Amino acid sequence: MINDLLSEIRIDFWRDIGLIINDEQLFDRVTANYGYHEIMYQNIDHFFIETNDDDFIKPKRKTTFEEVYDFYCLDQHIKNVMMISLQLFEQSFKVALAETALIENGKNFTRNLNPRTIHQRQFLNEKYQLKDGRVIHRGDVKARMRHIKQNYLEPYEGYTEAHGEAGIGLIIKEMSFGVATNYFFLMPIKAKKIVLTRVFKEKITLRQFEEWLNEIKYFQRRAAHNFSLLIIKEKRQFLYKLVLNNLHQLANQEPCELAEERINKIVQDYLTKYPIEKDFLNKVFMEKKD
């Protein structure tokens, strides 16, 4: 009874300001399943403008609830495609990280066997300070690695029997992306350069990689918490286009190519129903900075 009343109030509110709601059951179902505020307010600036008295809003043009919901779904589909491509990047990054760590840490271990070596040198540096001021500590990463060793999942049956314990490849595989990047920043400078050379098409500095990584993580955080991303800009550029540009810089182009192919198909299907959105979506995915 209370839900019915709430729904009635919400529908009346949107109709009063000019939104066309043809199917009240659809409105009730999708707002109940995916969130009233998620659907109605995250993209409100795309469909509505303030009136002269600034106390009310009105549609920019004739708009239905179905159009608002389809725009929300468009964002969801594209967001999912981007997250898959970013997972592919993470996999490539972890492979480069693990193989470099295996080789370079092995060299470090051999040097420590020299009888003239007085103090054994750790492979990972004690700490690393990022440009934003955050400090990564070796102890925190080591603690996470110990936890993984004690609780890892076998990548295939019989792994533990064959290897005895988790090697560096499996440990990095089991790391969250955040821990893996922390491990990367603590590596010796030579090892970090090797990883970056494998991952990127062109030379990139550590500070440039930090910035590149911050943009990717910003996207991932917003996507993971289901924020609308179609109308979001970062550094005067639509966020989707910014991340696609970042993927273009990778040596492994599959994540970028896959994202662009699938996004193009999703957008074209959407435009067959809403051709009026063509200019806006071209800006989101095609245009460079303002």
Image (spheres, helix red, strand yellow):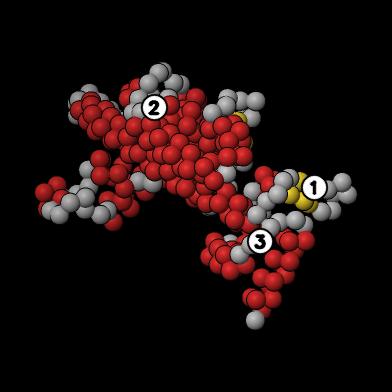
Depth order, front residue of 205/77: 77
Residue at horizontal 32 percent and vertical 25 percent from the top: 198
From where the camera sits, is residue 182 visible?
no
Q: Which residue is mark 1?
A: 50
In the image, residue 77 sits, relative to residue 241, either above or below, namely below
Labels 2 and 1: the sequence-earlier one = 1
Look at the numbered disc 1 and give the secondary structure of its residue.
strand
Q: Judge the density around disc 3: few (<14), some (14-19), many (≥20) Cα neighbours within 10 Å.
A: some
Residue located farthest toward the right when viewing the structure as drawn: 53
In whole angstroms, how far apart are the C-alphas of marks 2 and 1?
A: 42 Å
Q: Quadrant of the C terminus?
A: top right
Query: x%, y% of residue 153?
Result: 25, 54
From where the camera sits, is residue 45 visible?
yes
Please tell me whether mark 2 or mark 1 is closer to you in this view: 1
Depth order, front residue of 96/52: 52
Residue at horizontal 60 percent and vertical 51 percent from the top: 67
Residue at horizontal 20 percent and vertical 28 percent from the top: 110
Q: Which residue is mark 2?
A: 250
Q: Quadrant of the N terminus?
A: bottom right
Res. 185 image quadrant: top left
